[in-house]
Image (spheres, rainbow, N blue to C red):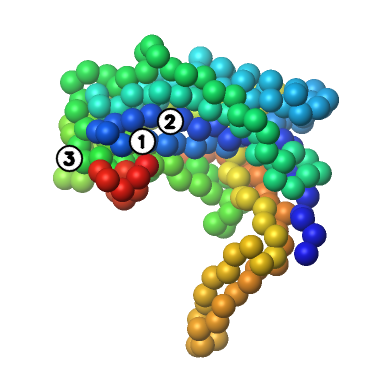
Amino acid sequence: MPNPPWNHNTLFQLTLLGTALGQQIVNVFNFEASGVQELSFGDDAARITASGDLADKWITGNKLAFVNASCTDYVLQNVKCQVMEVRGSFRHKLSPIERAQTTSNAGPGGYPAEHPGASVVVRWRTNLAGKRFRARSYLGPVPATAQVDGRVSGPYLTAMSTFVTGMTTRWAAGHAAPLDYYLTVYSRPYNEGEYQYTSRKTGTLQVVTPVEYEGNSTNVTTAQIDTILRSQRRRNIGVGN
C-alpha cells in the first residue's frame, strides 16, 4: 500500500535525557510548527535550524522549572530536538540537534528519590476526545517527601504545577498564541501491514491488520496533574528507561 503523506505542519520531537539512581530517564514532548513558522521553512536545513531554536527556547523558558520539579538524584544531561514529520512526506526524519546540559541541571537539594519508578502523571488535553487526541507524561522519580499516603502533595506539587503551567502558558494553543511552535499530541503514521493486534469483538479471537494511517497532530490546550502517585515500570532498576 502507498505511504500516507503527513498532512500537518512540521512535527518536532523534544527529548529530555537524564539519569537518576543509575537509570536513564527519558521524557518526550512533541511540538508542531505554527502556520507562520511553517511558511519560513524553505528547506530541510531551515527545519533543522528550527530544531535548535525550539530546544534553546525550551531550555531558556522551561528547563529551570522542570529541574526544580525533580528529585536530588536527577540530572538532566541532554536536550535533543528532531524533526519527525514534514508536510507532504512520509516519516521525513531529519538529523537531531543536541544541547548538552552541564550547569543548573540537577534536582534541588534535600529531596532524595522515592522509588525509581514512582512518577507524577501529567495529562495533556486537546479539544478533541479519543485516544489519539490525548497524551501523558510520567515525570519522576519523585522525591520521597513528595507524597503522603500515595498522593502527591506539598512543595513538590507546587513545583510540578509551576512547570506544567509554564508549559501550557508558553506552548499550548489558546494561551500565549505562540507564533512559532505548539505543544501537540502526535499520532504516528503507518502503512498497512506494519503491525497487527488481536481482537475479540465478535467473540472469536481475530488478528486485525489496520489500513494505512496518515497520522495526526492535535495541539494541546490544557493539562492536568494526577495527584495519585503512579509507577513507570521501565524506570525500575535493571529494566530500562
The tag earlier along the polypeptide, 3 or 2, is: 2
Residue highlighted by disc 2: 17
Give the residue at x 33% y 40%. 120
Give the residue at x 77% y 55%. 3
Q: In the image shown, does 126 or 53 lie closer to the viewer?
A: 53
The amino acid sitting under disc 2 is Leu
The tag earlier along the polypeptide, 1 or 2, is: 2
The amino acid sitting under disc 3 is Val
Is 197 above or below relative to 124? below
Residue 205: x %, y % from top left: 50, 83
* Left or right: residue 9 compared with residue 148: right
- The answer to whether mark 3 and mark 1 are in CB contact below 8 A is no
On residue 24, which mark appears?
Answer: 1
Residue highlighted by disc 3: 148
Residue 37: x %, y % from top left: 74, 25
Residue 8 picture quarter: top right
